[in-house]
Image: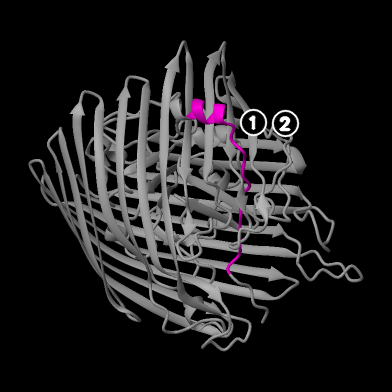
C-alpha cells in the first residue's frame, strides 16, 4: 500500500503596500454579505441587515440571539454564496475575516483552511450538527464538501473545546443545508464558466400539513469542469485536471406538537478530480484521479418541556472515503455521535448541561482501529444588557488517553451606546488521529495537542456602519510533527509531540454605507510561528485582507472586491517563498424576469499569476454566468 502523508495544501501571498494597509486598517470589513456578529453590536452588511432577533447556533451549541453573544462569529448566507459564483467551499471561506486557504491545484484537489493561522486539523467542522473529520489526514477534507448544498455558514473564531471537545483549537465551522418553510418553493439553476465548467442544480423546499407541521427540503446538483493542468513544474502529465461532482441532500422536519419536534438530515457527495502524480511515467502516461465520497446523516428530537427547560437528543453518523487511481491508495473514516443537550433559563441566567459520546473508526490498510470519547459539558450564560458573561467547562474521557479537562470564560461590557468591549480565555485540545498512532509512521504513545488562548475585542455598530477589532494569542504545546527515525516501524521518519507554536494577531473588520454604496472588508495582521525555531509557519502569511464595495445601479446589484495576501513560505524551514498577490473580482446580478435571476462574475480580473502551493497552478482569470429560476 502506497503511503501518503497528510496532504500538504497551501495558499499564495500578496505584498500589501503601506498605503493599502492604511486604507484597510480604517475600512476593514467582512466579505460581502458575511456578517461579523459579535453581538449585541451588529454589523450591517450589504443587502441583508441582521437584527437582534437573528440567531446563531455555533457559539454555544444552543440557538441564541445575537444580542447574547460575546464570541467572535461570522455568518454567510445563501445570497452571499450564490453571489460568489464559487464552486469550492474553501473559496467562499477565504473571503471571511481570519481565514486563509491553500489548495494543490483546482477544485477537488487537497485543500486546507487556516483559521487564525492554526493548522487545518485544528478547526472542528459540522454539517447540520454532524461532525466530519479524517482520521488519516486530520481535519475535514474540504474538497469533499459540496458547496451547492450549503445554505448558511457560521464561523466561530477561537478555541471552543469546552463546548465541542477535541479538534476546536482554532475555531469551529458549522455548515447548514436549506430548511423548508411556507408553500412549496422549487428552484432550478444552470451555469457555465471558464475551463468548460458546467453546473446544474434543482430542488424544492416548503412545509405541508396542518399549520406546516411537516417541512422538507430536497436538493440535487451536478458540476463538471475540464479544469487546467494543476502542476507548473517538474515531470508531470500535461493534461487538464478537471473534476466531476454529484451531490444531494434531504432535510425533513416534523412538529409533533407545540413542544416536540423531530428533524432528519442526509447529505451525500461524490467528487472525481484529476491530479498529477509525482511518479509520472511519460512512456506510460496515466490519468491520475482523486475519488472522494462524503456522507452525513443526523436525527434530532427537540423538546420544550416548559418555558424554562428544553432538551435536544441527537444521533449522528458521517463517513468519508478517499481513494486514488490508478495509483492505489484508500482510506475511510467513520464518525458516530450521540448528544443529550439540556438548557434551562431563569431570568437573565442561562444554564446548559450536555452528555456526549463520540466514536471514531479508521480503515487504512493495514490499520483497522477505533476509539471513543465520553464527555460531560456544563455552561452558564448571563445577559443583563450591559454585561454579558459566558462560562463553559467540559471533561472528556478518551478510551486511549483517559481524562481531559477544558474550559473557557468570556465577558462583554457595553461601555457606551453602540460600543462593546469583550475579553475571553480558553483551553482546547486535539487528540492525535488514529493514523498518527497506528500507521508505520505512528507512535502509540502520542499525547493530545493542547492550547491556551486569550483575546480582547472592541466592537461598534450603528445603522449600516460597523467596526470591530479583535486581538488574540493562542499557544499550542505537544504539537505533532514529522521528525526523523525513532520508535515507529519506519526508518524514514516518525510522528512525535516535539513542536510548539504560537498563533497571535489582530483581526479588523467593518462595514460603512456611503451615498448608496456599501463598503466592506477585513484585515488580518498575524504572526503564526514555531516557538522552537522562531520561524514563520508554512503557507501562512503575516497579513491578508479583503476590500470591496457593492451598490444598486438601475435593476442591477454590482460589486467589486480585492483579495490580498502577503508573502509566505512554502516550507517549515522558510526557504521557498510564495510571493504576495492581489486578486480583483467583479460581480453583478439582476432579475431578468419575474422568477429568473441572472448572475455574472469575473474572478482574478487582471489574470494574476500566483500560487497557493509551490509547483501548483491556479485558475487565472475566470468567468461564470448563471441563471436561476425560483418562483416568487
Which residue: 43% across, 17% down?
513
Per the image, the residue denoted by label 2 is 606
Give the CA separation, mark 1 to mark 2.
7 Å
Which stretch did the figure color magenta? 6-24
Horizontally, is 600 left or right of 127 in the view? right
Find residue 337 and report its horizontal and vertical position in percent: 35, 67
Residues 505 and 222: in front is 505
Residues 556 and 541: in front is 541
Rendered image quadrant of residue 565: top right
- Name the quadrant of the N terminus: bottom right
Chain-order first, disc 1 or disc 2: 1
Find residue 434 and report its horizontal and vertical position in percent: 47, 77
Vertical position of residue 79 compared to residue 490: above or below: above
Rendered image quadrant of residue 405: bottom left
Find residue 234 and report its horizontal and vertical position in percent: 81, 61
- Mark 1 surroundings within 10 Å by alpha-carbon count, few (fewer than 14), some (14 through 19), many (20 or more): many
Amino acid at each position: 500500500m502506497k503511503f501518503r502523508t497528510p496532504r500538504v495544501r497551501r495558499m499564495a501571498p500578496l505584498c500589501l503596500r503601506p498605503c493599502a494597509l492604511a486604507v484597510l486598517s480604517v475600512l476593514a470589513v467582512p466579505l460581502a454579505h458575511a456578517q461579523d456578529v459579535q453581538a449585541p453590536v451588529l454589523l450591517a452588511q450589504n443587502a441583508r441587515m441582521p437584527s437582534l432577533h437573528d440567531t446563531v447556533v455555533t457559539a454555544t451549541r444552543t440557538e441564541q440571539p445575537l444580542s447574547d453573544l460575546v464570541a467572535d462569529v461570522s455568518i454567510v448566507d445563501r445570497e452571499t454564496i450564490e453571489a460568489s459564483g464559487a464552486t469550492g467551499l474553501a473559496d467562499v471561506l477565504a473571503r471571511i475575516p481570519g481565514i486563509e486557504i491553500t489548495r494543490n491545484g483546482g477544485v477537488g484537489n487537497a485543500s486546507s483552511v487556516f483559521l487564525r493561522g492554526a493548522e487545518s486539523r485544528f478547526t472542528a467542522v459540522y454539517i447540520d450538527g454532524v461532525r466530519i473529520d479524517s482520521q488519516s489526514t486530520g481535519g475535514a477534507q474540504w474538497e469533499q464538501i459540496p458547496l451547492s448544498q450549503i445554505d448558511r455558514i457560521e464561523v466561530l473564531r477561537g478555541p471552543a473545546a469546552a463546548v465541542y471537545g477535541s479538534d476546536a483549537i482554532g475555531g469551529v465551522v458549522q455548515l447548514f443545508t436549506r430548511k423548508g418553510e411556507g408553500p412549496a418553493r422549487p428552484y432550478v439553476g444552470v451555469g457555465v464558466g471558464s475551463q468548460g465548467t458546467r453546473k446544474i442544480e434543482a430542488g424544492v423546499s416548503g412545509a405541508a400539513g396542518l399549520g406546516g407541521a411537516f417541512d422538507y427540503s430536497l436538493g440535487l446538483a451536478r458540476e463538471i469542469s475540464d479544469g487546467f493542468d494543476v502542476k507548473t513544474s517538474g515531470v508531470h502529465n500535461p493534461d487538464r485536471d478537471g473534476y466531476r461532482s454529484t451531490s444531494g441532500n434531504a432535510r425533513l422536519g416534523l412538529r409533533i406538537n407545540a413542544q416536540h419536534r423531530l428533524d432528519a438530515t442526509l447529505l451525500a457527495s461524490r467528487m472525481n478530480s484529476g491530479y498529477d502524480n509525482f511518479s509520472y511515467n511519460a512512456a506510460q502516461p496515466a490519468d491520475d484521479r482523486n475519488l472522494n465520497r462524503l456522507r452525513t446523516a443526523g436525527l434530532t428530537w427537540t423538546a420544550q418541556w416548559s418555558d424554562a427547560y428544553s432538551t435536544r437528543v441527537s444521533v449522528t453518523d458521517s463517513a468519508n472515503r478517499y481513494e486514488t487511481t490508478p495509483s492505489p491508495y484508500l482510506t475511510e473514516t467513520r464518525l458516530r455521535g450521540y448528544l443529550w443537550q439540556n438548557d434551562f433559563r431563569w431570568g437573565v441566567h442561562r444554564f446548559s448541561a450536555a452528555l456526549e459520546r463520540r466514536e471514531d473508526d479508521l480503515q487504512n490498510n493495514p490499520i483497522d482501529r477505533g476509539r471513543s470519547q465520553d464527555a460531560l459539558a456544563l455552561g452558564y450564560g448571563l445577559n443583563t444588557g450591559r454585561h454579558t458573561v459566558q462560562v463553559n467547562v467540559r471533561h472528556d474521557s478518551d478510551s486511549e488517553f483517559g481524562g481531559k479537562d477544558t474550559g473557557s470564560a468570556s465577558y462583554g461590557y457595553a461601555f457606551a451606546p453602540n460600543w462593546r468591549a469583550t475579553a475571553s480565555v480558553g483551553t482546547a485540545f486535539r487528540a492525535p488521529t488514529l493514523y498518527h498512532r497506528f500507521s508505520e509512521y505512528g507512535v502509540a504513545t502520542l499525547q493530545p495537542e493542547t492550547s491556551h488562548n486569550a483575546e480582547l475585542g472592541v466592537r461598534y455598530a450603528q445603522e449600516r456602519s460597523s467596526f470591530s477589532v479583535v486581538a488574540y494569542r493562542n499557544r499550542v504545546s505537544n504539537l505533532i510533527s514529522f521528525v526523523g527515525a525513532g520508535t515507529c516501524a519506519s526508518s524514514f521518519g516518525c510522528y512525535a509531540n516535539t513542536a510548539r507554536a504560537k498563533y497571535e494577531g489582530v483581526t479588523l473588520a467593518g462595514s460603512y454605507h456611503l451615498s448608496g454604496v456599501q463598503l466592506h472588508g477585513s484585515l488580518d495582521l498575524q504572526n503564526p510561528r514555531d516557538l522552537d525555531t522562531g520561524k514563520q509557519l508554512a503557507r501562512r502569511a503575516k497579513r491578508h485582507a479583503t476590500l470591496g464595495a457593492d451598490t444598486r445601479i438601475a435593476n442591477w446589484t454590482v460589486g467589486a472586491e480585492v483579495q490580498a495576501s502577503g508573502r509566505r513560505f512554502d516550507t517549515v524551514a522558510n526557504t521557498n517563498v510564495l510571493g504576495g498577490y492581489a486578486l480583483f473580482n467583479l460581480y453583478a446580478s439582476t432579475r431578468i424576469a419575474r422568477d429568473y435571476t441572472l448572475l455574472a462574475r469575473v474572478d482574478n480580473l487582471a489574470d494574476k499569476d500566483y500560487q497557493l502551493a509551490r509547483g501548483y497552478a491556479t485558475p487565472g482569470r475566470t468567468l461564470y454566468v448563471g441563471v436561476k429560476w425560483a418562483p416568487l
